[in-house]
C-alpha cells in the first residue's frame, strides 16, 4: 500500500509511526509533515488545508489510502473531493464535518436527537445581542465561538467581567477571525472529562481505548485553554457500566441521528464527554482523532493500523481486529514558553536520543523543523513524550524521566498529567 497522511502535528507523527510498522505499508507520504515525521515518511510541502493542492498531489502519486489528521481539510471538503475520484480516504464528508466545524450545528443536532448535553442559553451573531443576554444566564457560563479555533475558542466564565472580555476580544476585536462571528452560550457542567473516540465505516463502528486530555496550560488546570498539554489512557478510566451507558445513550443515538438526518459518516468521531453526577453528557464533537489523545491511543494499539483503516475506507470494518495492549499510556506535551499566546520558534532541541533510550518511550514530533543537521522548534506544541507501562504510574515515570532529558530554550510542560483529582469541576470543553 501507498499511504498519504495529511497533517503536520503530533497526531500525524503518531499515525505515520504506527502505519510504518505495517507490512502492508510500502510508501508513506505526509503533507506537510514535520522534522520528526521526515524520519518515518516522505514529507511534501503541501498545506493540510489546501484541498486543491492535495488533490493535485494525489493525482500524481495515486495513494491506495489517505488518512486525514486535522479538522480543517475535512471541513473544507477533502473527503468529498477524494471520494468523487474513487480514492480511498478515512474521514467524513464536508456536511458531516460540521459536527466540529460549527458548535451551533452540533448543539442543534444533539437537541434534535435527544442526546444528553449541556443546556444552551442561546446563540448570537452580534456582540450587542450577546452582551444583552449575559445578565440572564447562570454563572459559571460556557461561551463557545462557533467555528474552528484550534481548541482556543471556549471559555468557562466565572463572572460577567470575564465573559464580557471574551466577547469583546472575539466578537469586536476578531481575535479568532470569522470563527468568532457567532457565539453559543450554554450551562457549565460539573464532573470529570473523558475523550471517547470511535472509528466507523458508515455502518459498523468500533470504540478506541478511552483517554483523558488536559486542556489548560498550567498545572492544576490553571491558565488558558490550549490544543492539549497531555493525555493518558488506561482501562480504569472506563468501568463497564459507564462504557455501556456511553454507548447506549450517546454513541448509538449519535450514529442513528446522523443516519436519520441523511448524513453519511465515515472516519473517526471524537466525542468529548463530561461525566456528570446524572450521567455522561456531550461537551463537543470532533470529526477526527484528538491531539494529544492519538499519541496515547496509538501507543496501546496491538493491531495493523493500515489494515484496519483500509477496511474503514472500503466499508468493511471488523471491530474484532482491534486489539489493545493492557496497562496504560501517557503523552506529555513539551511546549514553547508563552504558548498558547505569543511564543518564539527556531530554538535548538537537544536530548532526544537519551530520552528515547528509556524503555517504552517514543518521542513524537509536533512543532519541529529540520535545518541542516539541527532540529529546531517550529510551533507552540513542540514534542509529545509518549510512554507505555503496566500501570499509569509506570508510564508516567518513564514519560517524565524522558522529558527531563530534553532541552530547548523556554521549554514548558505540565508536571501533573495523569495525576488528576476526582474533584468535580466546571468545564465546557
Image (cartoon, rainbow, N blue to C red):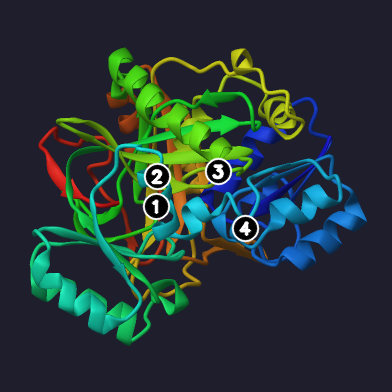
Q: Are marks 1 and 2 in contact (CB under 8 Å)?
A: yes
Q: CA distance from mark 2 to mark 4?
A: 41 Å
Identify the image quadrant of residue 200.
Answer: top right
Judged by depth in the image, the label closer to the viewer, 2 or 4, is 2
Q: Position of residue 424 (x, y in %)?
A: 11, 39
User: SS for tag 4?
Assistant: loop
Give the mark nearer the N terminus: 1 vs 3. 1
User: SS for tag 2?
Assistant: helix
Residue, disc 2: 112
Residue 108 circle label: 1
Q: Are marks 2 and 3 in contact (CB under 8 Å)?
A: yes
Q: Are marks 2 and 4 in contact (CB under 8 Å)?
A: no
Which residue: 38% across, 29% down?
Answer: 233
Q: Is residue 287 above or below residue 195?
A: below
Residue 34 circle label: 4
Identify the image quadrant of residue 247.
Answer: top left
Which residue: 46% across, 40% down?
Answer: 270
Give the mark nearer the N terminus: 2 vs 4. 4
Residue, disc 3: 261
User: SS for tag 3?
Assistant: loop
Q: CA distance from mark 4 to mark 3?
A: 38 Å
User: SS for tag 1?
Assistant: helix
Of residues 268 and 327, the one nearer the viewer is: 268
Residue 8 circle label: none
Amino acid at each position: 500500500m501507498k499511504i498519504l497522511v495529511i497533517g503536520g502535528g503530533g497526531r500525524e507523527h503518531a499515525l505515520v509511526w504506527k502505519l510504518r510498522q505495517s507490512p502492508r505499508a510500502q510508501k508513506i507520504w505526509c503533507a506537510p509533515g514535520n522534522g520528526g515525521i521526515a524520519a518515518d515518511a516522505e514529507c511534501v510541502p503541501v498545506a493540510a488545508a489546501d484541498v486543491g493542492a492535495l488533490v493535485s498531489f494525489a493525482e500524481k502519486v495515486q495513494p491506495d489510502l489517505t488518512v486525514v489528521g486535522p479538522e480543517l481539510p475535512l471541513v473544507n471538503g477533502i473527503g468529498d473531493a477524494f471520494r468523487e475520484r474513487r480514492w480511498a480516504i478515512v474521514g467524513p464528508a464536508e456536511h458531516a464535518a460540521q459536527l466540529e466545524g460549527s458548535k451551533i450545528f452540533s448543539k442543534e443536532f444533539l437537541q434534535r436527537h435527544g442526546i444528553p448535553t449541556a443546556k444552551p442559553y442561546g446563540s448570537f451573531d452580534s456582540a450587542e445581542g450577546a452582551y444583552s443576554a449575559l445578565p440572564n444566564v447562570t454563572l459559571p457560563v460556557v461561551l463557545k465561538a462557533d467555528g474552528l479555533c484550534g481548541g482556543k475558542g471556549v471559555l468557562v466564565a466565572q463572572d460577567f467581567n470575564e465573559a464580557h472580555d471574551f466577547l469583546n476580544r472575539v466578537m469586536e476585536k476578531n481575535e479568532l477571525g470569522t470563527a468568532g462571528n457567532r457565539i453559543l452560550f450554554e450551562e457549565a457542567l460539573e464532573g470529570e472529562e473523558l475523550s471517547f473516540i470511535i472509528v466507523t465505516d458508515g455502518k459498523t463502528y468500533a470504540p478506541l481505548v478511552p483517554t483523558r486530555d488536559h486542556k489548560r496550560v498550567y498545572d492544576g488546570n490553571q491558565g488558558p485553554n490550549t490544543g492539549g498539554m497531555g493525555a493518558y489512557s488506561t482501562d480504569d478510566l472506563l468501568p463497564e457500566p459507564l462504557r455501556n451507558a456511553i454507548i447506549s445513550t450517546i454513541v448509538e443515538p449519535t450514529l442513528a441521528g446522523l443516519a436519520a438526518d441523511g448524513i453519511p459518516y465515515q472516519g473517526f468521531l471524537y466525542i468529548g464527554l463530561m461525566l456528570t453526577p446524572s450521567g455522561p453528557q456531550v461537551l463537543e464533537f470532533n470529526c477526527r482523532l484528538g491531539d494529544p489523545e492519538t499519541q496515547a491511543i496509538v501507543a496501546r494499539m496491538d493491531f495493523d493500523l493500515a489494515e484496519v483503516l483500509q477496511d474503514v475506507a472500503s466499508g468493511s470494518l471488523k471491530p474484532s481486529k482491534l486489539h489493545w495492549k493492557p496497562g496504560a499510556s501517557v503523552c506529555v506535551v513539551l511546549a514553547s514558553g508563552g504558548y498558547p499566546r505569543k511564543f518564539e520558534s527556531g530554538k535548538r532541541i537537544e536530548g532526544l536520543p537519551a530520552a528515547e533510550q528509556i524503555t517504552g518511550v517514543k518521542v513524537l514530533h509536533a512543532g519541529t523543523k529540520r535545518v541542516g543537521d539541527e532540529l529546531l522548534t517550529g510551533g507552540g506544541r513542540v514534542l509529545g513524550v509518549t510512554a507505555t507501562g503496566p500501570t499509569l504510574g509506570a508510564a508516567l515515570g518513564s514519560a517524565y524521566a524522558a522529558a527531563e532529558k530534553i532541552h530547548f530554550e523556554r521549554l514548558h510542560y505540565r508536571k501533573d498529567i495523569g495525576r488528576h483529582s476526582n474533584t468535580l469541576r466546571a468545564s465546557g470543553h
